[in-house]
Image (spheres, rainbow, N blue to C red):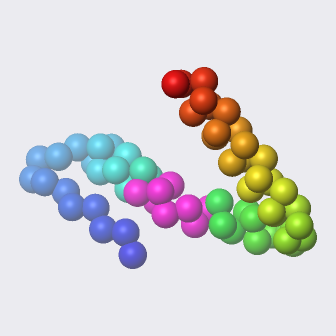
Amino acid sequence: MIVVPIKEGENIERALKKFKRKFEKTGTMRELRSRQAFTKPSIVKREQKKKAIYIQQLQREEE
């Protein structure tokens, strides 16, 4: 359960923005969308490898 403490006199839009940010970090919507359709484990593994390669390339360019 997501709890967003609100200080006295704090704007409701700011509290809503905090809630949305916390909700996005939990990844529930991403998980729900991925569960809508079955993906084969081999495809999942392939995408993870592609992502790892991409991140390594970014890190090498940074150095």
Viewer-closest of 15 and 2: 2
Up/down of 58 relative to 26, above or below: above
Quadrant occupied by the N terminus: bottom left
Residue at 9%, 53% (x, y): give it: 8
Residue 30 rendering spot, x and y as whole percentages: 65, 60
Viewer-closest of 15 and 43: 43
Magenta extent: 22-29
Residue at 28%, 61% (x, y): give it: 4
Residue 5 rendering spot, x and y as whole percentages: 21, 61
Q: Is residue 26 left or right of residue 51?
A: left
Prevailing secondary structure class for the magenta stretch in the rendered image: helix
Viewer-closest of 46 and 24: 46
| Quarter of the figure with residue 38 | bottom right
Residue 56 rendering spot, x and y as whole percentages: 64, 39
Residue 59 rendering spot, x and y as whole percentages: 57, 33
Q: Is residue 44 left or right of residue 23?
A: right
Residue 34 is a magenta residue? no
Residue 23 is a magenta residue? yes
Tell me if residue 16 can be seen: no
| Quarter of the figure with residue 47 | bottom right
Up/down of 12 relative to 56, above or below: below
